[in-house]
Structures are given as C-alpha cells and as structure tokens.
Image: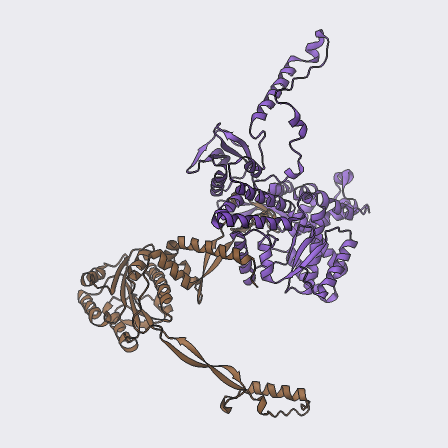
Amino acid sequence: MANLSKNLQDLQEEIEGHARSYGLDFFPVLFELLDYRGLNQVAAFGGFPTRYPHWRFGMEYEYLQKSYSYGLSKIYEMVINNDPCYAYLLECNQIVDQKLVMAHVYAHCDFFKNNLAFSKTNRKMMDVMANHGTRIRRYMDAYGVEVVENFVDVCLSLENLIDPHSPFIVRDRPKDRDQPEDQRPQVRRMKSKSYMNDYVNPPQFIEAHKKKLEEEARRKKRFPEAPQRDILKFLIEHSPIENWQRDILSMIREESYYYAPQAQTKIMNEGWATYWHSKLMTEKVLTDAEVIDYADHHSGTLGGRSGRLNPYKLGVELFRNIEERWNKGRFGKEYDECEDLVERARWDRRTGLGREKIFEVRRHCTDVTFIDDYLTEDFCREHKLFIYDFNPKTGMYQISDREFKKVKQRLLFQLTNAGQPFIFVVDGNFRNKGELHLQHKYEGIELKHDYARDTLRNIQKIWGRPVNLDTTVDDKGRRITFDGEDFEEKDVTDKVA
Amino acid sequence: MILRIEQDHNRFKQIIRGRIKKDLKKYISSGELIGRRGKDYISIPLPQIRIPQFIYGPKQTGGVGQGEGAIGTVLGAGEVEGGKQEAGNQPGEHLLEVDISLDELAEMLGEELELPEIRPKGRKNIVSSRDRYTGISRYGPETLRHFKRTYKETLKRSISTGIYRPDNPILIPIRADKRYRSWKSAVMPQANAVIIYMMDVSGSMGEEQKEIVRIESFWIDTWLRHHYKGVEIRYIIHDAEAREVDRETFYHTRESGGTVISAAYKMCARMMELEYPSEEWNIYCLHFSDGDNWSQGDTEECVSLLKTQILPRVNLFCYGQVESPYGTGQFLVDLKEAYTEDERVALSKIENKEGVYQSIKDFLGRGR
C-alpha cells in the first residue's frame, strides 16, 4: 500500500492539515495510486480488492472498462468506509485533480466516521471481506464452483431484503424471556371498595384489556411474532439449508448491512464531500495556475444533463443553504412566520451558527431527514426542482408539477428505504403447512413483476416449501405462489396496504 | 500484471458465451450482428444480466428533476430513466457490448448447427513470403540510405562532440552515421478459397429478400473464413445481364429488368477458368434468386452450364431460393430434378428470415 510519490505524499500531508484545521475528524487515510485498470477493478469489487469470486464483479469490470475506453466515463476517486480508510487515486490524473480527490476523500472519511447511520458498520470491513473471500473459495473447493456460485446468485437476489434500521433496535429484551410461559399476565384491577368497583374498574375496560392480552398471547404463538423486514435473518434462522449455505447467506447479509448506510446517505455524503473539497481547494490548496482546470472539473461534478437531479449538486447546495440560514438566523418561529418578502430576503441576525449547524446535520441526518428537515420552499423554487412522470399516452417522461409539497414528498418517497419496496415476512407456517408468506407493503408503485417471480423462485430454493407473496397489481390484491415447480397467481380480496 | 478481477471477468465472459450460444438462433436470423463486425471481432449487444430482486417497476416511478421547463415539458423517453433514482443504489440498465472473435462465433455456429468440418481440397495453406521494408540497419547499399535518420545521427554526433556551429550548420556524415532501410520477410498466407456470390437483382427481388441474402452470406463468410486462412470474395449481380460488382453495390442494386440466370453462370464459369484453377482453389459458388427465370430454355442452359463448367471446378454450389411474392420458384424445382443426387449441389428454399437457420444448415451441412 501507500505507493505515493514524494510529491503526492507532501500534498496529502498539506491537505490533511487543512482538513483538520476546519474541524473535520477522520480515520487515518491510506491513498493508493492505481492505473485505470486497477481502479476499475477496485470499483468493480465495490471498493474491496479482496472480495469473493463472482462473475458479477467481472460484469461490472467489463462495463467500466468499456465505458472508460470509449471515453464515456472515468472514475476519479474511490474511498471505502474502513479504519484506516482506504482511498484510491487514478495514476494518470493531473496534480490538480489529485488535490481535489484528496480533499473530497477526507470529507467522505469524516462523514463515515461521524455520521450516525454509519456508527454500527464494521470498521474492519477490509478484513471481513477478505475472510468472506477465503470462506467462499473454500466452499467452492469443497462443493464445486458452479454449485457455490449458483447459491451465491440466489443469495444476491435476496440481498436487499434487510431492515437497515435494525442495527439500532434492541430486540429480544431479556426480561421478556425470563417470564415463565404458563404465567399468563392478568388484567390489573385497581383497589376499590366493592360499591365503587364498577366505577374504578369499569367492566367494558376490563373486557377490552383482557381481549388485548389474549391477542398478545396469540401473537406470541405466531411465527414470526410480528411481520419481520429482515427476511434474510429469518431465512438464516429458520430455513432447512446446509450449514455452508447458511454461512454464505449470512455473509451476504453482513455485506448488505455494511453497504446500507451508503445508500441511505448518498446525497448527504456526496454533498458533504463536495462542500469540503470546494472549500479546501478554493481557500487553501489551489495555485493560480490550477484555477481554470479546477473550475472545469468541479463544474463537471456538479453539472449533468439538464432535467436530472445530481446528488452531488443537491447535497452541496443544501449544505450551503443550511449554513447560510444558520449564519443569518433564518430559522425559528419568527422567521417562519414573517411574510414580508423584502424583509425575509434581507433577514440577517448575524447568528453565525452555520458551520456548527452543518456539522450537526452531518452527524444526525440521513438523506430522508436531511431533505425532510432542511429542504425549504425557497430552496425548491430557487433550484427549480420539479417532479416528472411517465406519460403512457406519449411514452415519454414529462414534467408534471413544481409545487413544493409534491416535490418534497416525491423526493422523500424515493429516498425512503433507499428506493426499495417494503417486503415483510408475515408467516413462516402459512396454511399450517410450513409455507412462507411474504407481504409487499403497497405504496402506489407496483413491483417489477417478472423480477418478483424470479426472486420468489430463489426464495423457494432456500425455504424449501412453497412461498407466497401478497402484492398489488392493477390496484388489486394479488397472491403469487411458487411451489418449486409452478407459479400460481390469484387475486386476493383485500388490497395489501 | 494479472489483475485479480481477470478471474471473475473470464467467468463472466464464459457465462456470456453460454448466453450467446443459447440465443444464437435468434442472432442468426436477425441482421443485427452484421453491422457490428470489426476486423477480427464482432461486438454483440446484450442486456446486462441482472440478478432478480424485489424492485419497483420502472414506468410508474417517475422522479424528481431540476431545471427549466413548464409543466408538460417532455424530458425524453429513456433519458431520465435513471433520474433521481440514482440516489438509491440501483444501477441503471446498461447495455453491454461483448466482443467475441469471429473464430469463436464460427465455432458456436458449427456447434449450434452441427456443421461438419470442411475438408479442403488442393494444397492446404499456401503461403508466400514477401519482403517489406520496415527496419533500419547500419549497413546497406547507398540506394537504400535513410536520409532523415542519417541526418539525425550526424546531428547528434556533431552536437555531442562539439563540432556543431549554429551560425554555420554544416553537417558531414561519416560512415558510422549512416542508416539504411532494411527488409524483413513476412510470411503471408495466400488465399486458397474463393466465394463467388451471385444474386438476382431483377425487379422481383425486394429489400426483404436482399436482407435475407445478406444475413445468410454473413454466416457463410464467417464459417468459411474460419476454415481457410485467406478467403477471397467476388460478387456478381444479374438481371438479364451479369456484371461483377463490389460488396456495397451487390447488396444495394435494384434493377428492373428480367431474369436470365445463365448470364451469371457464364460469367462465374469464366471467372473460375481464368483466375481460380480448381486444383489450387477451394471454390464456393452461391447463387440467390427468387427462382423466376426468363424462359425454360434458359433454365436448360443453366443446368448444362452447371454440369459442364461449374460443378467440376467447385467444392460446393449452393442455390438459395428466396421467397418473394412475385416469383414462381420454378428454378428450384428444375434444379432439384436435375441434381438430387449430386453432393456438390446444395439447394435450399428460404421463406423468411427464420428460414436462414435451416438454409445455412442445408448449405454447410455437407462438410465440403
């Protein structure tokens, strides 16, 4: 590692110093210089040169290689959430680009270290990935490459069936377990004189409470107790697969959980890094001769085809907007209730809290809360945000609205669960025949049907018994069943909500 | 340096080959691949292999964008497909271009159609050597002196020894400065197979018919090139008269005249007689028509031309009759009558693009 030239080492030292002086707080960063093939390789591996063998990395590589050689795309930078943080530089980049990338990387690294969504990620992932690689290779030696590869394909088809919030939820509290099975909880009655009893403990209340307790007892018999989003976990714990398969499935799950926060904070993470590279470059690092090149490449990052929303741009603009608002005191009841446009535009209370505020935001938010809390109507108007929809009549995407509320709602919807549908396992003993019952929580968008069927096929391979998915097609409830040989689809009466 | 990814990359390529092989039938009957042919490689567009997951259907999604435009402004059909979605972790649909070599494609074709290997006749792999002046040497005849290189050497020497005077830049080469062109003998494989394509371009052969010919000839080219080191290709078009043309013209000419097939056969026979002695060449003649000859008399002449002049020389004579709404298709019937037994003659009726598959099998299935 660390094959930097003296020149780049000096630069790293300089930029690291500047980053620290602004208050960024990061793991040690190890830069490695790679040629484009090397960088494409690392990118294809999702950042880790030590992944398990799988054709999909080869496919990604093929794509990156082709796009690079046709001049369509070029990866500038690659940084992975680990302690120490590994970052890769492209050998053939100009010095000004290397500076930009380094500044960018330090901000990413600060974000990894401090954002709460990342707080539960494994910081020794480089080693973990290498271990996964070794284990899967060993299974390949033992059971055959194709057998293992096919199983990995099956697992990857389910890799998004996790609950990104679950690392933060403490489940299975020990006190629940301590309770003996037979000791049914009783409805508690308040102490009272007999003539007052009906008033202190009204019978309908007692009755309702009793029902509730019974319901709870029934629920405990259910399997799983409550609908579970972490389907991978459920499958790992309850499916009749072999141990090596269980091991692979849990490795895939672990990697999914590692990557999940990155999908949850794409806008913030890139916005934060862009904010800081621009600050470090323009205030500290740039030499006069480099200004034009820097401006060119910086605008390249923030540009993009018109009509598209660029996460780098949205993120950085929003951070700047927050900084300005908190510097000028444009927040709180008084400002929100001010309807005088002139005064609002002139509003400046010299609070100077901007810098502090953005550090706080980068610590507490994910994309969803970032947009929800800080995307204002003014911002939406100023940056010309709109929503577009597919018009089936023309076969085109068209701008459909610019209203603030709708834009924000759509944006939030797309960010929720990183743009993935919500699927729950509701019953592991469906029809009392050991079938698996899954439910798609319908929120106005249907599943991609052919994929859903193929995924179901893969789940069945793991579960062994027939699997059922309740979803919504054409506004009607639909149950797709796969029994290992055939698919069956039928309408179910109640729409799944 | 070998990268670790190579292993995965090769595995991926292997999978892709499997897919191409599986879909080869589809590729054979579509003209898609023809335009994608490089010198040794062909690039095949494939949809990226996506591992199925529970994801949202694309069309209903819509998204959030940024920029000018009133409500109703069209953003384009596929343009925004990725859109804001990219904030998620879904890669957009990429189309992969996979390069495979023509040799490999031919092998797949062979396996798919169960084609026997060709047994070439005549001298195999004739090679000739040719001298090419590509090198530089310190010795040689003055006639081959390389002025520029010699000049450079002289200049270098003068400067480094301090003789050179910028105000009086006279350079005098000495023996050691002189550089000469030198040659290398390159072994060139010589063509020992020729394909002569003949096509009826009379009014009744439409665009669709020509497309079929084009597709079919692409695969035949690929297969024959796989077996012979160098392959020459000649093109003859005919209506009532025949003439030799280049490839472009061959596929794009449309005449309105009638059809006299014997004209083409005569020309073909003459071509073979003059340029391709049959003891040295593996000759393949392919004729495509809609089977509507001018007269029965001419057909008889064709049959006799084939018998006396063409068939004795060729490895294989193929006649592909492309179905057209105008043709009677009589010619195929006549040929069939005359040559059912002759294994040098392959006859095939191609009804549409899907028929190309069977027809290639008919033509190349004899291993000649």
Q: Where is residue B105 in the image (x, y as percent from the top left)?
A: 40, 60
| Figure colour scheme | by chain
Q: Which of A338 and A88 is in front in this view?
A: A88
Chain letter, purple in picture: A
Furthest-front residue in view? A142
For the image shown, how many numbered marks are present on the structure? Answer: 0
Q: Position of residue A29 (x, y in %)?
A: 71, 55
Question: At 60% across and 20% down in the image, what residue appears?
Answer: A214
Tell me which corner region of the image, top left, top right, bottom left or bottom right, holds residue A208: top right
Query: For this view, does A24 lie left or right of residue B199?
Result: right
Furthest-right residue in view? A350
Q: Is residue B260 visible?
A: no
Tell me which corner region of the image, top left, top right, bottom left or bottom right, holds residue B281: bottom left
Q: Position of residue A484 (x, y in %)?
A: 44, 38
Instruction: Using the image, determine if residue A219 lies above or below residue B127.
Output: above
Furthest-top residue in view? A195
Chain letter, brown in picture: B
Q: Nearer the viewer, residue B23 or A233?
A: A233
Q: Position of residue B248 (x, y in %)?
A: 38, 68
Quadrant of image for the C terminus of chain A:
top right
Q: Is residue B186 visible?
A: yes
Instruction: Using the image, determine if residue B141 lies above or below residue A147.
Output: below
Question: At 49% across and 90% down in the image, what residue appears?
Answer: B143
Tell me which corner region of the image, top left, top right, bottom left or bottom right, holds residue B335: bottom left
Q: Which of B149 and A276 is in front in this view?
A: B149
Query: For this view, does B122 lie left or right of residue A385?
Result: left
Instruction: Using the image, determine if residue A477 lies above or below residue B159.
Output: above
Quadrant of image for the N terminus of chain A:
bottom right
Query: For this view, does B219 lie left or right of residue A408?
Result: left
